[in-house]
Image: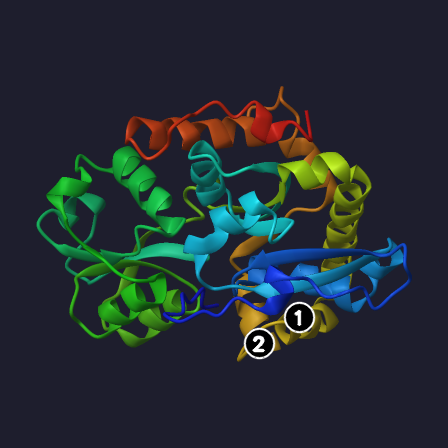
Amino acid sequence: MKKLKLAAMVLSAAILAPAASAYAAETKDVTMAFCTWTGYAPMFIAKELGYFEEAGINMDIQVIEDESTYAALITRGSVQFLATAQDPNIKMYGNGADCRFVLTMDASVGADGLVATGDIETLDDLAGKTLALDKSASSYYFFLTALEAGSSLTEEDIRVSDMSDTTEAGLAFMGGSVDAAIMWEPELSEALESVDGAHALVTSADYPDTILDSLVVNTAYAQENPDVVAAVEEAWYKAVDFLKENPEEAYELMAGGFEEVTAEDIASDVEGLEFYGREENAKLNDADSERSIYKISQDMADFWMAKGECKTDDLTDFFALIK
């Protein structure tokens, strides 16, 4: 599914000045934002099936493609909840965004990949080649991690073409203007099918802890409304359970929240995703686990801190709600 960044994005009045609740006086108006991506779409299940309303929440879900606005929106409380990839969440927090981690939503286990022409057989063969990617996207961390772990190269050994979004990177590869590209679905499958000799050198299935999606909340709002945070978390778990038990109906509900997205698009994306419900989050939140959300996130923070992309790699307060 496309995570498009629109050149002109007008933030709705619902974000700047939330409308009065249409429900009872005790109902709390809450705004959540995320871009067009299947990993976040179970929130539409929660909304359409009344999980938020049952908890006294009038949930306004805003689909905002311009991720450059996210840190400002969550910090000033224009949106109370924000869903995006954990890697950008860590960078936002490390650079002063006033937010707290709530839960892990999903992990990419094949929905993202590095696709190359037939003459590029290994990561080392990328030396001197042109590779298209979007450095602002979560897949950039995946790319650098794979490069460091699976080759003798650094980013400087490759002609990296920084694109405005990952869809553009995929289209550049399919158009023949670059030798390789970092892309996600649906461009990933389209490239493999349409370009003669195209193949995936690595995918997120090889590095499953590099691309996870998570939910964060404005810090002050969380402190003042712990009941809402708990209710949103519960609504997510119920939605994931529904998705696992009723996939066909769930795909329709998930697609309905986005423009120009079909249930078939959702079904295709789901093949490369693992959704995290209550049990999966409990395991990730276990600090004694070899694969905990704390370790995964600290690796991200340390990585970007070393590259000068974060002002701090201390995540203690970021995880205050679940520790």
Q: Which quadrant holds residue 104?
A: top right
Residue drawn at (55%, 55%) of the image: 273
Label 1 secondary element: helix
Q: Residues within 10 Å of mark 2 (few under 14, many from 20)?
A: few
In the drawing, does residue 309 fall left or right of residue 236?
Answer: left
- Provide residue 221's location: percent of width, then percent of height: 69, 41
Among numbered discs 2 and 1, the one appearing first in the sequence: 1
Residue 203 in view of the camera = no
User: Which of the colour schemes (rainbow, by chain, secondary structure, one colour) is used?
Assistant: rainbow
In the drawing, does residue 40 fall left or right of residue 72?
Answer: right
Query: Residue 264 has which mark?
Result: 2
The residue type indicated by label 2 comes to: Glu
- Provide residue 233's location: percent of width, then percent of height: 74, 45
- Provide residue 184's location: percent of width, then percent of height: 40, 61
In the depicted structure, whether residue 31 falls above or below residue 283: below
In the depicted structure, whether residue 287 falls above or below residue 202: above
Residue 318 in view of the camera = yes
In the drawing, does residue 130 fall left or right of residue 200?
Answer: left
Query: Residue 138 has which mark?
Result: none
Residue drawn at (48%, 22%) of the image: 314
Which is more toward the observer, 186 or 29? 29
Query: Residue 251 has which mark?
Result: 1
Query: Please, which residue is most extreme toward the front here?
Result: 17
Which quadrant would the C terminus be assigned to in this image?
A: top right
Which is more toward the observer, 21 or 297? 21
Residue drawn at (79%, 53%) of the image: 238
Q: Residues within 10 Å of mark 1 (few under 14, many from 20)?
A: many
Tags 2 and 1 touching, CB below 8 Å: yes
Q: Which quadrant holds residue 216?
A: top right
Residue drawn at (90%, 59%) of the image: 25
Label 2 secondary element: helix
